[in-house]
Image (spheres, grey):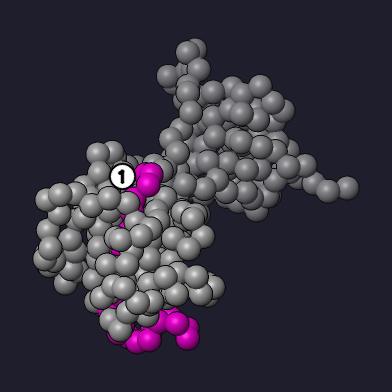
Amino acid sequence: MLCRQVVSLVLLGISCLLCGCGASSPIDQLLASVAGPVDADAPEKFTTTASGLKYRILRKGDGEQPTLKDKVEVKHAAWFDNGRVFDATYDSGQQMTLPMDDAVLGLSEGLQMISEGGMIELEVPGKLGYGSQGSGKIIPPNATLHYLVELIRVIPPPKPGPVDADAPEELTTTESGLKYRIRRKGDGKKPKVTDAVTVHYKGWLDDETVFDSSYDRGESVSFPMNGVIKGWTEGMQLVGEGGMIELVVPGKLGYGPQGHPPQIPPNATLHFLIELIEIVPPQQ
């Protein structure tokens, strides 16, 4: 329920814990039972940001602070104005992994205010939550959402691996006009046009504008060799499994005069850094 797409969870255990007798609100119950310690100087009042998010930092933490490119591991509970809990991990004793750029806006803003080991309470207005559409049968339209979130760990996006010490500085040009240089040879076989490959990659234009990056998404991608632009199909056959290649793809081997709006203009030269993780041969 932290993400924009909501899934239904069984919350009987945590609902009984938070809605039972002995405390005046869900936050009181959480802080008295399952949540970690609060800083001695933690504020009692909320601060409101320019966006309308209300927050109070209950524990600052002393580790890394997340950015929108990161994933985070958190423990959390969430409830409505009336105290009814709609999502929680405390009942299971587990934590969840959340892509920062896939969280509701109030959460992604709030989590960037604390560090690993920290804890924050948030009051998220509808416009920073699920808006006028709500989400399914669980979140009504324009609902204000309350969260207690403990930031366990920041998971930064992967970065490209090492480059060979003898990697060439100059690019080689093939007969088709593709330019390439092998940054890491790899020690596996090279893919064929009939194979599929799993890769990490980054793509940018001549002006260094990045138009796509699996590194930023934190997930590798798989595709058939015969289902991509010509420059990729040709270039990927030059590097072994485990290797890394840099490509400069002229427009005629890329998206041609039609481009690929809105990111890629007509006849654009495309630059790629690609790591070949795995080759998947065609099924016989």
Q: Nearer the viewer, residue 152 or 174?
A: 152
Label 1 SS = loop
Residue 270 sits in which quadrant?
A: top left
Q: Nearer the viewer, residue 103 or 8?
A: 8
- Left or right? Give the position of 188 relative to 249: right
- Left or right? Give the position of 119 relative to 228: left
| Residue 200 painted magenta | no
Q: Is residue 171 above or below residue 97?
A: above
Q: Residue at x 60, y 35 (%)?
A: 276
Q: What is the magenta range? A: 131-154
Type of amino acid at the residue the image marks with label 1:
Gly
Residue 116 sits in which quadrant?
A: top left
Identify the residue under disc 1.
117
Q: Is residue 254 above or below residue 92?
A: above
Q: Quadrant of the N terminus?
A: bottom left
Q: Is residue 4 above or below residue 75?
A: below
Q: Is residue 184 visible?
A: yes
Q: Residue at x 18, y 68 (%)?
A: 54
Q: Position of residue 49 (x, y in %)?
A: 13, 65
Q: Nearer the viewer, residue 148 or 186?
A: 148
Q: Residue at x 69, y 30 (%)?
A: 190
Q: Residue at x 47, y 36 (%)?
A: 273
Q: Position of residue 150 (x, y in %)?
A: 33, 54
Badge 1 density bin: few <14, some 14–19, many ≥20, Cα 10 Å: some
